[in-house]
């Protein structure tokens, strides 16, 4: 059974960036596209989850590659495909220094 106190009985430590602005000596506010600078992780699954954050980062990396002139195949949401995976077993190490260097393998879903 939930308890409802008659008066406040706790302290909330959560603070947002705008709560800290009065304490800043020289505050500077920048406006940016949400897709470039913000992808929260608030839930274990679904919206604002580690999966959606990872996908947002992959979309950002694809935008950076396209801005540099690299062709990137993406789905309609901007998520790049194919995905690439680093294979540690084939990675360059000092013992394997005579090899060709790092190896990457394409990992398509």
Image (spheres, rainbow, N blue to C red):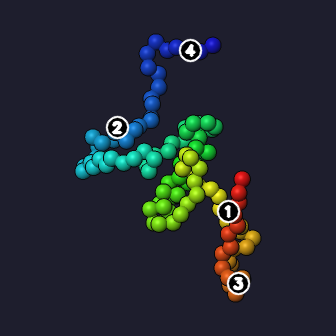
Q: Position of residue 75 (x, y in %)?
A: 59, 50
Task: State if disc 3 and disc 1 touch (CB < 8 Å).
Answer: no
Q: Which residue in the rendered view is the most extreme toward the right?
A: 89
Q: Nearer the viewer, residue 15 or 57?
A: 57
State the quadrant of the N terminus. top right
Q: Which residue in the rendered view is the most extreme toward the bottom?
A: 98
Is 33 placed left or right of 105 in the picture?
A: left
Residue that badge 3 annotates:
99
Of badges 4 and 2, nearer the viewer stands 2
Task: State if disc 2 and disc 4 touch (CB < 8 Å).
Answer: no
In space, the residues marked 2 and 1 are separated at their CA atoms by 40 Å
Q: Tell me the crowding category of disc 3: few under 14, some 14 to 19, or many 20 or more residues within 10 angstroms, Cα based.
A: few
Q: Position of residue 57 (x, y in %)?
A: 53, 52
Residue that badge 1 annotates:
85
Which numbered disc, 1 or 4, marks the residue that appears first in the sequence? 4
Question: As displayed, is residue 79 above or below residue 49?
Answer: below
Which numbered disc, 3 or 2, marks the residue that appears first in the sequence? 2
Which numbered disc, 1 or 3, marks the residue that appears first in the sequence? 1
Residue 22 sits in quarter? top left
Q: Position of residue 18 (x, y in %)?
A: 34, 39
Q: Report if residue 81 is visible in the image.
A: yes
Residue 3, disc: 4
Q: Nearer the viewer, residue 102 or 23?
A: 102
In space, the residues marked 1 and 4 are separated at their CA atoms by 50 Å
Q: Secondary structure at mark 3?
A: loop
Is 108 placed left or right of 69 in the picture?
A: right
Q: Nearer the viewer, residue 9 or 36?
A: 36
Residue 19, disc: 2
Q: Report if residue 54 is visible in the image.
A: no
């Amino acid at each position: 059974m939930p308890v409802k106190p008659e008066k406040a009985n706790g302290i909330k430590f959560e603070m947002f960036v705008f709560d800290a602005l009065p304490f800043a000596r020289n505050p500077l506010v920048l406006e940016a596209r949400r897709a470039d600078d913000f992808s929260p992780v608030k839930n274990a699954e679904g919206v604002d989850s580690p999966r959606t954050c990872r996908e947002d980062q992959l979309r950002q990396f694809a935008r950076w590659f396209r801005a540099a002139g690299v062709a990137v195949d993406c789905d309609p949401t901007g998520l790049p495909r194919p995905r690439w995976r680093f294979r540690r077993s084939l990675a360059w190490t000092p013992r394997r220094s005579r090899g060709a260097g790092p190896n990457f393998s394409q990992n398509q879903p």
